[in-house]
Image: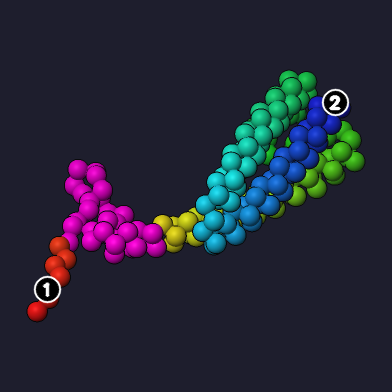
Amino acid sequence: MLMWREMKEVMRALSSCYAELVRVSEAKHKALAAMDLKAIERAVKEEERFAAEIERLETRRKAALRVMAEKEAGIRPTMKMRELLAQCPDRRIAGELAALHEELDRRMKEVERFGERNTLLAEGALAAVTANLNRIGGTAAGASYGAGGKESVTRERRFDFKA
């Protein structure tokens, strides 16, 4: 029973981390839209902190699952959550774990959606910066690569003919 409670505690902590990651992703989205580099840097550092915490919690979850598999014959470390919940001796804990699993799944999808949107914003901002640099410097640097795998940059000569 102890490992089931441990699993519940870990799932709750994971869900909480992902909720915070959603909040950070929203802040990053606003910072990217406003081109606020300081805020983007803060958001990235927070994301890294939460990613490390999620990794630590995942290690704990896997360890709890391994111990459960060693103690109970019907449990394997590779089981899906729904299969695992069918093995839980306490229906109340099984219900709580099922709710936590669904909440965690929803939050993970939300973080993924924000990640995709933030990637699009970052790529758009980078394209705008590249276009402005090309205009200012008289070069055409794009996302293309030459035959040797190096980025290709062409230089244009802009002569100012005054008649």
Residue 109 shows in the view: no
CA gap between label 1 and label 2 equals 83 Å
Badge 1 or badge 2: first in the primary sequence: 2
Compared to residue 115, the image places residue 159 above or below, namely: below
Q: Secondary structure at mark 2?
A: helix
Residue 32 horizontal side relative to residue 152, left or right? right
Asked if residue 139 lies in the magenta stretch, the reply is: yes
Please name the colour scheme applied to the rendered image: rainbow
Residue 151 in the image: x percent, y percent?
26, 48
The residue drawn where x is 60% and y is 47% is 43
Residue behind mark 1 = 161
* Left/right of residue 88 with respect to residue 69 in the rendered view: right
- Nearer the viewer's eye, disc 1 or disc 2? 1
Question: Which percent across, then down, holds residue 93?
Answer: 87, 38
In the picture, the quarter occupied by the N terminus is top right
Q: Which one is in front, 77 or 19?
A: 19
**Does the rendering let one see residue 159?**
yes
Residue nearer the viewer, 31 or 119: 31
Q: Is residue 46 left or right of residue 71?
A: left
Residue located 31% across and 54% down the image: 143
Asked where in the image residue 137 lies, by quadrant, the reply is bottom left
- Disc 1 on helix, strand or loop? loop
Read off the magenta span: 127-156
Residue 2's tag is 2
Crowd around label 2: few <14 · some 14–19 · many ≥20 (10 Å): few
Residue 155 is covered by the magenta coloring: yes
Q: Residue at x 54, y 62 (%)?
A: 33
Q: Residues within 10 Å of mark 1 (few under 14, many from 20)?
A: few
Q: Amino acid at mark 1?
A: Phe
Identify the amino acid type marked 2. Answer: Leu
